[in-house]
Image: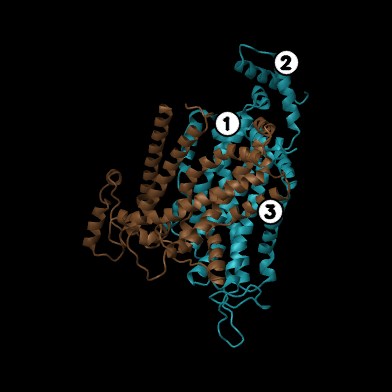
Amino acid sequence: MTLLKKSKIRRASAVYSEDRAAAFDPSRVQEAMAIWAAGRSRSVFAPLIETFGLLVKDRMAVVGMAIIATLAVVGILGPLIVPLPPFQALKAPDGTMLRLAEPSAAHPFGTDYFAHSVLSQFILGIRIAFLVGLSAAVAVGLISTVLGLVSGYFGGYLDDAIMRIVDIALSIPTLPFAIIMVAVLGPSLENVLFVIVLLYWRNGARIVRSAVLTQKERPFIAAARALGASHWRIMTYHILPNVLPVAFLWMTMSIAFAVLTEASLSFIGLGDPSMASWGQMLNLAFQTASIRSAWWWVLPPSLGLILLISSIYFIGRAFEEKTNPRLRQRAA
Amino acid sequence: MRVYLARRIIQSIIVVFVMVTLMFVIFRIIPSDPTAMLVERGMPEETRQRLLEQWGLTGPLYVQYVRYLTNLFQGDFGLSFFYSKPVWEILAPKVLNTLWIAIPGLLLGATFGSVLGMFVGWSRRGGAIDGLGILLATVIRGAPPFVTGILALMVFSGFFDLLPGFGMRTPGANPSGFAATYLNGDFLQHLILPVAVVALTFIPENLLLMRTGVLEARGEDYLEMVRAKGVSEFRVMWHAGRNSLLPVITWLFPSLAETVAGIVLVEVVFSWPGVGRELVFSVTRQDMPIAQAGFFLLAVMIVASNLLADLVYSYLDPRVVYK
């Protein structure tokens, strides 16, 4: 208790007695201070690290993480190993364009209709997928966390207002909305990202809010309040660390949704024309009527999308399994 | 019950109203020059003015908004630029085409998914069947529907040349009448691949929902009771499955609307002339009347099916209390 200054104790008990003017009990203030002191030594990221520890125990989540890490490494190092530019038209030894060439030693993934190397384009696709996924996830994560925290912590009219907006936003048909918005705004990376963020903050805010609600009524929050902590301090120091795992999970899931949405938009020709994403590779293969024959052109982007998105779902599912108490009880 | 019903209906009306306003914002306010989107460039000035008037694009914004609302509530979406026909005349047959693949796909997916989910949930937790079920469900869920469609097309229509994957009937066929159009082998053959892809995309959700339900039900006392009656273990599982159906059923209604919205790309892949493909076409053709009506249709479907889901849920689950 040496951590506390006398003035702080006095202020704390004053606030506490204001709250519970009728039943003021000095021993509860001591109890509150004990909880406060016990919680102090924990790192802000402790809940996040603990959750990660749980996830690592799930075999499928580990496989998912490994796949994502592998893709990331290939995306980063790829251009060093395969120096061929993705948009260089390749020529056969006899001087003709190397269109739709089957995989060979020189071009392990073959070439596409425009005589570009499929392998180089696939690697470029990894980079674009991560660029789109990560930037959308950061924006979605920030907006959901802030709105969820404010909505859940303050409650009342503010909460009602935010949650009604979320309700309405949830009845927007996802893909048609994305198609129309990008068509109206113009197909560019910023607009695609903007639409993705517009679509996925809504679920995130709701999930974070419900996590905040479970924290809000815990004794340590009452203790912090009794000790005179400000709303800002309670939100950022006492509640935020405990809802970080959920917020982080939603960020991870947003990567999958962002990649999926970008791929869908690109597939119908509404992607950024300067971004040769996996969706755009599939669009070109489809437009040139090559999907029935050029399997080496279709499989890499298809499997890339499936691998990346399912890996993220594996992590999300493990999280749900480990944190759903109704499922955990029956584990034995 | 009546109060609950009235409140949910009023809520839904408000949501539709907000959607309509959102559409106004998207189509009239966000584009710097909405007329450029609505009226083709290079059009004679006189025609342009007439079209603008027809579309209610003259006058201040609030006047436009009121006019837009009145037209909408009279069911008037204007003329398509591309077809020069009323929008509903174009979209109505497409709705039917979409439902041809949406409803069978959804029902097949739900049936297969929940039966598989029951077995997976009943198997030993963390065992081989459980692991395989989750693995498959997650990988299928991770596959974007259009990718599944492309792979199906590549394998079944390309490599093995077993099934057609383009449109609703063999090119050249031009049947008339309901029976001749829909109840023949050619149409059914064309139906197989798209329906299979839609069904496949719906298996995972149902499987995982059912697995969780059965898993939660396994420790319940009523199952002990059933077992004590001396019935076979399969019957016990059936009991657990039936009692876990509730989330699957409530999930069905909103997912019908989401299916219709989500199979947009499946329709594109299989060149299936449905609402979704028309929406994509209308966007590339700058045919905004169709795009607007298509979006409105999908939004209303989602709101209506959410409402229906809530009502069905409160009817099926006696534990739900009406407020």
Mark number, residue B180: none
Cα distance, mark 3 to mark 1?
A: 34 Å
Whether residue A57 sits left or right of residue A16 in the image: it is right
Q: Is residue A217 visible?
A: yes
- Counting from the top left corner in percent of width and height, residue B301 is at 41, 46
In front of the other: A83 or B213: B213
- Kindly state the secondary structure of the residue where label 1 is placed: helix
Name the residue that disc number 3 marks: A64
Cα distance, mark 1 to mark 2?
A: 27 Å
Q: Which mark's residue is nearer the viewer, 2 or 3?
A: 3
- Counting from the top left corner in percent of width and height, residue A39 is at 73, 30
Amino acid at pointer 1: Tyr
Amino acid at pointer 3: Gly
Q: Colour in which chain B is shown?
A: brown
Q: Residue at x 64, y 40 (%)?
A: B235
First reached walking from the N terminus: tag 3 or tag 1:
3
Name the residue that disc number 1 marks: A153
Whether residue B66 sits left or right of residue B142 in the image: it is left
- Tell me which chain appears cyan: A
Name the residue that disc number 2 marks: A27
Amino acid at pointer 2: Ser
First reached walking from the N terminus: tag 1 or tag 2:
2
**Residue at mark 3 shares a chain with residue at mark 1:** yes
Chain of the residue where label 3 is placed in the rendered structure? A
- Structural crowding at the residue carrying mark 2, measured as other residues with C-alpha within 10 Å and reported as few (<14), some (14–19) or many (≥20): few
Q: Residue at x 63, y 35 (%)?
A: A236
Q: Quadrant of residue A66?
A: bottom right
Residues marked 3 and 1 touching at CB (< 8 Å): no
- Kindly state the secondary structure of the residue where label 3 is placed: helix
